[in-house]
Image (cartoon, helix red, strand yellow):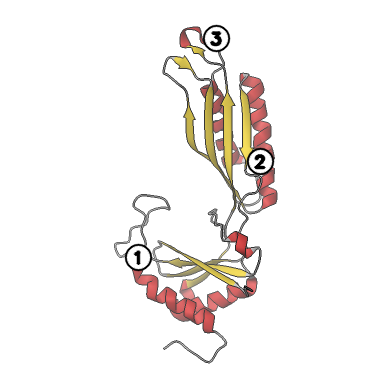
Amino acid sequence: PHVDEMIIFHFVTDHRPGIDIQERVASATLGKVEIEVRGLSTHWAAYETGIDAIHAAALAVECVTDINRYYPLARPFALGIGTIQGGTGRNIVADSVRLSGTLRTPDLREYQEIGRLLQKRLADIEKTTGAQIRLSLSDQPTPSIVNDGVLVDKALQAGAYVFGPEHSTLSHELFLSGDNAALFFQQTKGVFIIFMAPNRDGSQFPFHSSRFDFGEDVFPFALCTLYRYLTMGQEETLQ
């Protein structure tokens, strides 16, 4: 079927109710990072005959952290390791370690730039340690959501009508989340709306925290905002 435009929305906890919309780029270009480190196993009593994969992996993690904190990319990005698996026993020099993580950038060009830098830095660690290090980076990352400017203005007007102008805000600071809905945004224009939903007790916990929650009191206002958005320019008005 033909789709004229898309609206997607998320709820997040915040200290105030309302809506927030990114001016253009609304989510990150997102891909998996897998680093496989191969060393040479031996007993720690004869450690000089082996190649310590854990040591090489530790240097790789340090490298990732250094890039994430200090590489001077013009726009925000995130590169990090989320899991580490390796080793067979406490008295054995590990011969393999697997690291997995994420790379998130505003667009594909910056994603590829960070990927090339990481590959070069890992090659230097190979030379230093003697370990073999293989980087696997998603070559078809989830693209960024890019909001349509006209639809952004329309959504801000709808939010201002329901929540008030001071609670309908345009954001310029990219939050590096990812969303598969970006694939649909490549086919048609759309807008990504964030509804701020404060908890009654004032608590705010980050995404993926076991204590994350948001206030459901905002639901009727969110529904009214979507209705207002869909009916703007028509004769119907909110009662």
Quickly name the residue at label 3. Answer: 48
x%, y% of residue 14?
Answer: 41, 62
Q: Earlier in the sequence, mark 3 or mark 1?
A: 3
Q: Residue at x 54, y 75 (%)?
A: 155
Marks 3 and 1 close (CB-CB < 8 Å): no
**SS at mark 1 in the image:** loop
x%, y% of residue 204?
Answer: 37, 57
Q: Amino acid at mark 3?
A: Glu
Quote the CA–CA distance across marks 2 and 1: 39 Å
Q: Amino acid at mark 2?
A: Gly
Residue 215 has which mark? 1
Point out the residue furthest to the bottom here.
235
x%, y% of residue 136?
Answer: 62, 37
Quote the CA–CA distance across marks 3 and 1: 58 Å
| Residue 88 seen by the camera | yes
Residue 115 has which mark? 2
Q: Earlier in the sequence, mark 2 or mark 3?
A: 3
Specify the quadrant that holds the C terminus: bottom left
Q: Amino acid at mark 1?
A: Gly
Q: Residue at x 47, y 74 (%)?
A: 166
| Residue 164 seen by the camera | no
Residue 82, compared with residue 96, is above or below; it is: below
x%, y% of residue 233?
Answer: 57, 87
Toward which corner of the image does residue 195 lie, by quadrant? bottom left
